[in-house]
Image (cartoon, grey):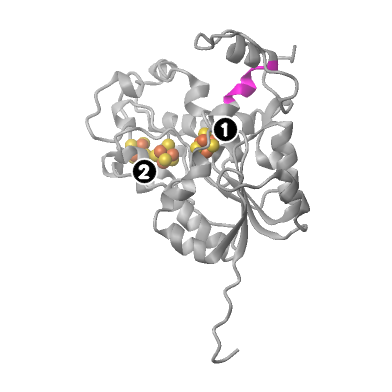
Amino acid sequence: MEGKKMKNVKKKIAMYWGAGCGGCDVSLLGIHEKLLDLLDEIEIVFWPCAMDIKYEDLEKMEDKSIDIAFYNGAIRTEENEEIAKLLRKKAKLMVAYGSCAIEGCVIGLANLYNKKEIFEAVYLKNETTKEKILPSRDLPEFLPYLKTLDQVVKVDAFIPGCPPPKPVLEEALDALLQGKTKFGKEVALCEECPRKDTKPEKIEISKFYRWHEKEDNGECFLAQGIICMGPATRAGCKGECISANIPCTGCMGALPRVRDQGAAMLSAIASLLDVEDEKEDEVIDSIKDIIGTFYKYSTAKLLPRGGMKDES
Ligand code: SF4
Ligand code: SF4
Ligand code: SF4
């Protein structure tokens, strides 16, 4: 085609918002001016939040006609599950976008309770709800437990974060548009943390604090006895929260090849602590809300079978 400009074939993209807060759905806008470059390369064919399109339109598309489907949010209802399966059928690449889709995120903590308990807490015991009524039956069926996307369909790539931070998203989009499904850093957040030079080899403390319980002196949070998930969290965000003087809660998830982020963090703490053996348990016991702290994002992934209590 010498002398003639090659026609730019745009990649067909779909974006779907499952069970999540919506932060992921709008996080694409967070890449700012890069979005304009992106629009030269992609054609959005399905994005219910941003365009007038119905599920029937998706059903009518040819199988594998979408190049990349981004699914954000978890699988909490029958509808989420149906759309995940439909998108999988229609897309060449299926991408779990954000912590909810990858590991369940904060809403995955609901897997510690059964459906009856969740409905009672949300609709009947919630003090801010004026009329105590349960939802009608014509809503999509609420599944007995929350699932991650890869517990429902095969997933080709994962973009971590809650929502995916800008540098993570930019790298992932570049890779995916080139057909690559592996991307991201393989080191812990501490490696790129703005406070990394103040992280000591050993931590001499007698008690752990929650962030709001102690005045921040600007040094490594762990050295101050404030829980920071950096040692067990995958790098990539460049320490977004820490730059805002907030400890990391671990939204980027575990490092590659580490299954249990919470256990990895407990192990990191144990190896960092420089206290007498008999005091170690006491220091670890001072950590409040073990599940909410160490498994804030990964409870559903690690506890997929509908919580610890029987459905009743
Ligand atoms: S991963 Fe975070 S930002 Fe994205 S939908 Fe879930 S809660 Fe919202
Ligand atoms: S523990 Fe937290 S504050 Fe300390 S270096 Fe690691 S990420 Fe930074
Ligand atoms: S600092 Fe931690 S919680 Fe904040 S964006 Fe990075 S990985 Fe997520």
Q: Tell whether 31 sits left or right of 39.
A: left
The secondary element bearing badge 2 is classed as loop
Mark 1: amino acid? Ser
Q: Residue at x 41, y 46 (%)?
A: 237
> In terms of sequence position, does the residue under pointer 1 or pointer 2 come before the other?
2
The stretch of residues the image draws in magenta is: 109-115
Q: Tell whether 159 sits left or right of 140.
A: left
Instruction: Please state the horizontal and vertical placement of residue 198, each as a whole percent of the image.
Output: 26, 39
Is disc 1's CB within 8 Å of ligand 1? no
Mark 2: amino acid? Gly
- Quadrant containing the N terminus is bottom right
- Quadrant containing the C terminus is top right
Instruction: Tell me if residue 34 is in the magenta stretch.
Output: no
Kindly identify which residue carries mark 2.
Answer: 239
Q: Tell whether 63 sits left or right of 241.
A: right
Circle 1 crowding by C-alpha within 10 Å: few under 14, some 14–19, many from 20: many
Kindly identify which residue carries mark 1.
Answer: 298
Q: Residue at x 31, y 18 (%)?
A: 213
